[in-house]
Image (tube, rainbow, N blue to C red):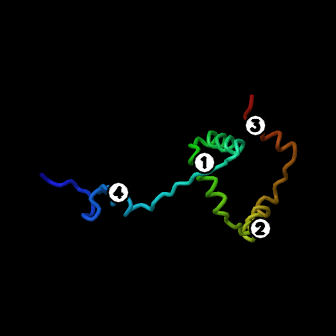
Amino acid sequence: MRRPLTGDLLYPRIPWWFHIATSQEPLMANLTIKNLPGTLYEQLKQSAAQHRRSLNSEVIVCLERALHNTRIDTQAVRTKARALREKTSGYRLTDKVIFKAKNEGRP
C-alpha cells in the first residue's frame, strides 16, 4: 500500500496541498474588530450593498483606501487644467447653447 502524499516527513500530519499553497501565495491574515459601533456597522453594510460587495470585501476596500493615501501631483493637475482651458477657450457656453444641446434629437 502506498503512503499518501503528506508533505515533509518531519510533519506527516500537514497535508501536501498546504505546502503548495503557502509556497505560491502569501498568507492572508485575519482581523477581528471588537466594539464596532452599530451605526458604523450599518454604514458598512449599506456601502457594501451599494457596491455589490460582501461586508468583508467592503471593509478591505475601505482599509486600502485609507492606508494607500496617494499624494496628488498638483503641478501636473495644474498643467492639465491649463492645457484644457487653452484648448476650450474659443467655446462660449451660454444658456442658449446648453438648451439647444439638451433638446437636440428630442421630439
Q: Which mark is residue 78?
A: 2
**Which of the two residues, 95 or 30, is positioned nearer the viewer here?**
30
The nearer-to-camera label among 3 and 1 is: 1
70 or 13, which lies in front? 13
Q: At numbered mark 3, what does the secondary structure look like: helix, strand or loop?
A: loop
Q: Taking 60 as reference, is 40 left or right?
A: right
Query: Quick one: label 4 or label 1, which is nearer the N terminus?
Result: 4
Point out the tag, 2 or 1, that comes first from the N-terminus. 1
Res. 91 image quadrant: bottom right
| Three-letter code, disc 1 | Glu
> How far is disc 4 from disc 2 in space, using C-alphas?
52 Å
Within 10 Å of disc 3 (Cα), the crowding (few <14, some 14-19, many 20+) is few
Residue highlighted by disc 4:
18
Task: Write the residue at 75% across / 71% down.
Answer: 75
**Quick one: SS at disc 2?**
helix
Query: How far is disc 2 from disc 1 in space, using C-alphas?
Result: 33 Å
3D distance between C-alphas at marks 4 and 1:
28 Å
Residue 58: which numbered mark, if any? 1
* Mark 3 residue type: Glu
User: Which one is in front, 99 or 53?
Assistant: 53
Q: Residue at x 31, y 57 (%)?
A: 14
- Judged from this view, the residue extending furthest toward the bottom is 75
Q: Against 14, is 44 above or below?
A: above
Badge 2: how crowded within 10 Å, few (<14), some, or many (20+)?
few
Q: Which residue is mark 3?
A: 104
Marks 3 & 2, CB-CB < 8 Å contact: no
Asked if disc 4 and disc 2 are in contact, CB closer than 8 Å, the reply is no
